[in-house]
Image (cartoon, rainbow, N blue to C red):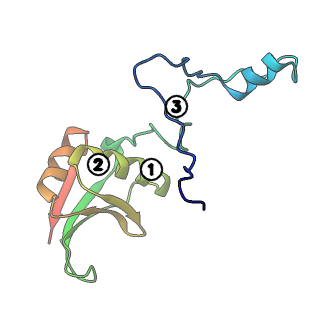
Amino acid sequence: MKKGAKMAGKKRIPIDGSSEPLSNTLLGDLLVEKGLVKELAVKPSRAAGEKPPLPGEGKMPDLSRVGKIILRVQRKGRGGKTVTLLSCAGLAAVDLEPLAREMRKALGCGSRVEEEGIVLQGDVQERASVWLSERGAARIVGGS
């Protein structure tokens, strides 16, 4: 590079509002505007930024029909970390994921589904028992 030559700088975007407004149009709207497509056959049903629903989302299982729910606190095989295991025989495997998601939000802890049931991170046995009884669970058994 020659001495005294200036490098091209970044294009600055003014923040005082003097620039032209940003457009929030969809790609389909731009294609129609340019004349590349006559009209969109399918209109988007969701608002911009809205996530599509996950399978099984929003279908909270009926806990009053579940026979017995067992809550156990365990450290064995978890690297010294304490977890609370929730196992219930009367609940289908597809119902475990929505239940784990709701418990994760309500109890403020991590959760995941394993083959024996739901694993809640930490010793949240008492809080989980209260939460489950509020949701209609009849028999909640605590173990160690």
In the rendered structure, find residue 95 and report the number of the disc placed on it.
1
Tag 1 or tag 2, which sits nearer the N-term? 1
| Position in image of residue 88 (x %, y %) | 33, 59
Residue extending farthest to the front is 3
Q: Residues within 10 Å of mark 3 (few under 14, many from 20)?
A: few
Give, as a three-letter code, the residue at label 3: Glu
Give, as a three-letter code, the residue at label 2: Met
Name the residue that disc number 2 marks: 103
Dot 1: element: helix
Dot 2: element: helix
> Which residue is at the front of the view, 69 or 28?
28
Dot 3: element: loop
Give the distance between the C-alpha atoms of the residues marked 3 and 1, in whole angstroms: 24 Å
Name the residue that disc number 3 marks: 50
> Which residue is at the front of the view, 32 or 134?
32
Give, as a three-letter code, the residue at label 1: Asp
